[in-house]
Image (tube, rainbow, N blue to C red):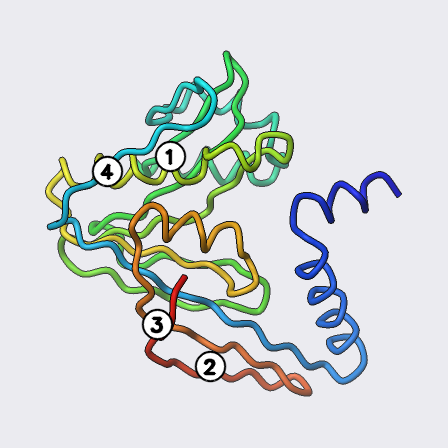
């Protein structure tokens, strides 16, 4: 019961309810419908760095940080991170002392594509010259709602701007209210919304221009 209450506290009752309904539909008629919002940030604009509420250490990660990251990820994901470092991928982390409490990865222009592993949301996001994609971010549950997500993201934007990048993308499911607000606060603008629909085993994608606010 304690784990359930913590999950509701971290994600919100409405989000948990929607996930439960989706699970029931998936198990009964094999139906799922997920909306993914693709947002962009044009680096021609000034990047306003935002500091977190507490004095965390935020920096680019190195391979030696793997031992710290293994405290908040599974063994399988730790091996994935090891492969990413070997390939020269870039990761930003936040530390509370020596403890890793947040990570976020960057796919850059020298990578042909990035894979977005949301449940039911598998697609290839092709990157052009001067474009980057922020993906696979995570905050340790006890450190959420402390401004870490927004703060690290703005520092990643500054890093990419200094490297000469022109445009940055980020994706989030429509029911992830906290991440949507964080992206908006960091300065991202909604670009596309993708509907991922599964019915009786058949999969469909519908792409639309994003309207409204994050």
**Which residue corresponds to mark 1?**
151
Instruction: Compute the Cα span from label 3 to label 1.
Output: 24 Å
Frontmost residue, 44 versus 125: 44
* Horizontal arrangement in the rendering, residue 25 relative to residue 106 (left or right): right
**Which residue corresponds to mark 2?**
205
Sequence-first disc among 3 and 1: 1
State which mark lies toward you, 3 or 1: 1
Instruction: Compute the Cα span from label 3 to label 4.
Output: 24 Å
Instruction: Compute the Cα span from label 4 to label 2.
Output: 35 Å
Quadrant, the C terminus:
bottom left
**Which residue corresponds to mark 3?**
192
Sequence-first disc among 1 and 2: 1
Frontmost residue, 137 versus 2: 2
Residue 149 on image: x %, y %: 44, 39
Residue 207 on image: x %, y %: 39, 80
Query: Mark 4, residues whose alpha carbon is within 10 Å: few (<14), some, or many (≥20)?
Result: few
* Horizontal arrangement in the rendering, residue 14 relative to residue 130 (left or right): right
Residue at the spot x=35%, y=75% of the render?
A: 211
**Which residue corresponds to mark 4?**
48
Does the CB distance between marks 1 and 4 fall below 8 Å? no
Sequence-first disc among 4 and 2: 4
Does the CB distance between marks 3 and 4 fall below 8 Å? no
Residue at the spot x=28%, y=59% of the render?
A: 40
Sequence-first disc among 1 and 4: 4
Mark 1 element type = helix
């Amino acid at each position: 019961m304690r784990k359930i209450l913590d999950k509701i506290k971290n994600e919100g009752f409405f989000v948990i309810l929607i996930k439960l309904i989706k699970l029931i539909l998936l198990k009964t008629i094999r139906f799922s419908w997920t909306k993914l919002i693709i947002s962009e940030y044009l680096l021609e604009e000034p990047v306003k760095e935002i500091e977190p509420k507490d004095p965390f250490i935020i920096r680019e990660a190195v391979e030696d940080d793997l031992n710290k990251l293994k405290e908040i990820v599974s063994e399988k994901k730790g091996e994935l991170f090891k492969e990413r470092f070997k390939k020269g991928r870039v990761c930003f982390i936040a530390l509370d002392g020596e403890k890793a409490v947040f990570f976020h990865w960057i796919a850059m222009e020298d990578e042909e594509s990035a894979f977005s592993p949301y449940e039911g949301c598998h697609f290839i996001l092709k990157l052009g010259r001067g474009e980057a994609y922020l993906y696979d971010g995570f905050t340790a549950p006890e450190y959420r709602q402390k401004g870490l997500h927004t703060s690290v993201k703005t520092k990643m934007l500054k890093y990419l701007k200094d490297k000469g990048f022109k445009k940055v993308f980020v994706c989030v499911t429509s029911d992830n209210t906290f991440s949507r607000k964080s992206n908006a606060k960091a300065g991202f603008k909604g670009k596309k919304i993708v509907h991922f629909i599964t019915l009786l085993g058949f999969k469909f994608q519908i792409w639309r221009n994003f309207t409204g606010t994050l």
